[in-house]
Image (tube, rainbow, N blue to C red):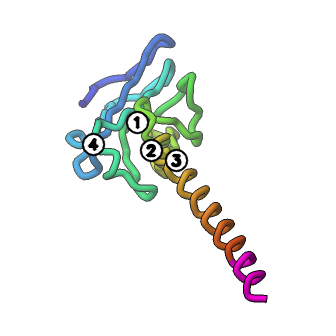
Amino acid sequence: MVINGNLNLQPSAITLLEIAGTLNQGVDYNYVCVNGSILASGLLQLSLLSGHENFITPSTVLTLVTANQITGNFFNIASGERLTTLDGWGSFQVDYTGGNLIVSNFIAIPEPSSLVLFVIAGWIIVLLRWKGSSHIIKHSKLVR
């Protein structure tokens, strides 16, 4: 999207930027070009479209907005802080200084089911090792 002129986001504004890939700016992910300045206010929200979260890596850097200058602040995120995506797939570092709004340094948030499986697998390993070591002790008593 191209805006010729200034963009003043009101305190009630919700700026939703969607990401469905990393290759084509304005096609795979939202891109706004403002031929003027932006006064940031309201909420900034990021969303990874379903199935595309696997294309995002920690080294992904996406310029989502360009302008002559960005002033002000979004209420929910200061420049340089992390913002969790609406869908909960992960979080990005958001920087909006000068004339660009850039997201980078993606950190995926594991699904609860994956985390539960990881914990269960860890406990199984601990129990098997514990049972195996007590078996060795019993066996060594029998040998004596």
Closer to the camera in the image, 43 or 125: 125
**Which amino acid does the dot numbered 2 rest on?**
Val
Instruction: Please give the residue where the numbered disc 4 appears in the rendered image.
Output: 51
Badge 3: residue crowd in 10 Å (few <14, some 14–19, many ≥20) = few
Looking at the image, is mark 4 or mark 2 earlier in the sequence? 4
Residue 87, quarter of the rendered image: top left
Q: Nearer the viewer, mark 4 or mark 1?
A: 4
Instruction: Please give the residue where the numbered disc 1 appears in the rendered image.
Output: 68
Cα separation between marks 3 and 2:
26 Å
Cα separation between marks 4 and 2:
19 Å
Q: For residue 139: magenta?
A: yes
Q: Magenta span covers which residues?
A: 136-144
Instruction: Please give the residue where the numbered disc 2 appears in the rendered image.
Output: 103
What SS does tag 2 mark? Answer: strand
Labels 4 and 2 touching (C-beta < 8 A) = no
What residue sits 64% from the left and 72% below the top? 132
In the rendering, at what x and y percent does residue 139 appear? 70, 80
Badge 1: residue crowd in 10 Å (few <14, some 14–19, many ≥20) = some
Instruction: Please give the residue where the numbered disc 3 appears in the rendered image.
Output: 115
